[in-house]
Amino acid sequence: MNAIIQVKKLCKSYLSGTVPLRVLNDIDLTINQGDFISLMGPSGSGKSTFLNIIGTMDSPNSGEIWIAGKQVTHMPENQLANFRLKHIGFIFQFHYLLPEFTVEENVAMPLMIGGLHKHEAIVKSREMLDYLGVIERAHHFPAEISGGEKQRAVIGRALINSPDILLADEPTGNLDKETGERVLELFKTIQKDLNQTFFLVTHDESIADIAKINYKIDNGKLIKQSK
Ligand SMILES: Nc1ncnc2c1ncn2[C@@H]1O[C@H](COP(=O)(O)OP(=O)(O)OP(=O)(O)O)[C@@H](O)[C@H]1O
Ligand SMILES: [Mg+2]
């Protein structure tokens, strides 16, 4: 098995007043290439905190995070930004598409930030939008498309650099049931076509159903659920 992410003895506490609030307590986890993982747990249990830490957006108090064979725990921020761009795709509940850019420009953005010429980046972006079934919205601005279409564009932007792992926090959280189901179908297809590694944080049982590996977070620990 090819480990994409290794988490070792991860601890995270926040200081609430004078009392430290221990959110993640000595967590070990290995994510292998092609894994499709869901993480569930009550509100406030630390799901987003964990996702943000493995996505290098937040740092732990102690422990190690290894991504694609590199320890990221003490990487300086300027190196981290570049590392994130190449290795990690993010999908959040609220779409952060840039409003003043078209859909195809938004999806092309990570390629351009990585140094690709705009013309080539747009060609690749359009291929991605075609794959995701939203090519006819390529020239629209985010305000001019539906929630489900926005989510497809966000997925396209997350996938465009072929990340080692796609991290999603409540990816169906503000979509209606039918649109949410279509996004899930898309995840399944992406996983099959690209052997894409997924780590999805969710309250949605149907996501947990399609994930091959399920975890629950309880009292700061990840507990693997039997299928
Ligand atoms: N920056 C912060 N400072 C202090 N406490 C925080 C901070 N961020 C999160 N917390 C606390 O850490 C705990 C875990 O928060 P987290 O956002 O990870 O929960 P969650 O499982 O994602 O919940 P939800 O399902 O509601 O999104 C909560 O009790 C929260 O109040
Ligand atoms: Mg959360």
Image: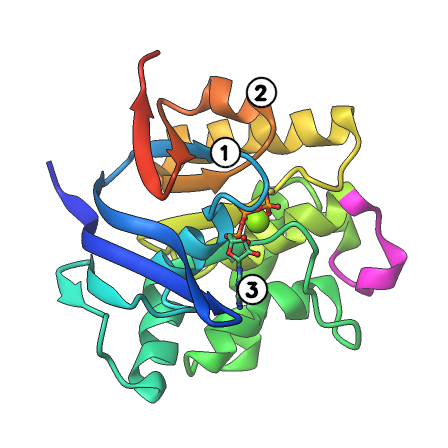
Where residue 78 sits, quadrant-wise, is bottom left
Residue 67: x %, y % from top left: 22, 59
Span highlighted in magenta in the image: 138-147
* Left or right: residue 216 compared with residue 2: right
Residue extending furthest toward the front: 18
Name the kind of residue labelled 2 in the image.
Answer: Ser
Label 1, ligand 1: CB separation under 8 Å? yes
Q: Residue at x 66, y 70 (%)?
A: 105
Name the kind of residue labelled 3 in the image.
Answer: Val
Q: Residue at x 67, y 25 (%)?
A: 181
Asked if the residue at tag 3 contacts the one at tag 2, i.e. Cβ–Cβ closer than 8 Å, the answer is: no
Asked if the residue at tag 1 contacts the one at tag 3, i.e. Cβ–Cβ closer than 8 Å, the answer is: no
Q: Which residue is mark 3?
A: 123
Q: Up-down: is 115 above or below 11?
A: below
Residue 84: x %, y % from top left: 37, 69
Label 3: how many residues lie within 10 Å, few (<14), some (14-19) or many (20+)?
A: few
Label 1: how many residues lie within 10 Å, few (<14), some (14-19) or many (20+)?
A: some
Q: Up-down: is 213 above or below 104?
A: above
* Left or right: residue 217 compared with residue 3: right
Name the kind of residue labelled 1 in the image.
Answer: Gly
Q: Which residue is mark 1?
A: 41
Does residue 29 appear in this view?
yes
Query: Which mark is on residue 206?
Result: 2
Q: Secondary structure at mark 2?
A: helix
Q: Mark 3 and mark 1: span between their CA atoms?
A: 40 Å
Q: Up-down: is 166 above or below 11?
A: above
- Say which of marks 2 and 3 sits in front: 2
Q: Residue at x 34, y 70 (%)?
A: 59
Q: Mark 1 and mark 2: span between their CA atoms?
A: 14 Å
Asked if the residue at tag 2 contacts the one at tag 1, i.e. Cβ–Cβ closer than 8 Å, the answer is: no
In the image, 79 versus 28, the foreground residue is 28
Q: Mark 2 and mark 3: span between their CA atoms?
A: 34 Å
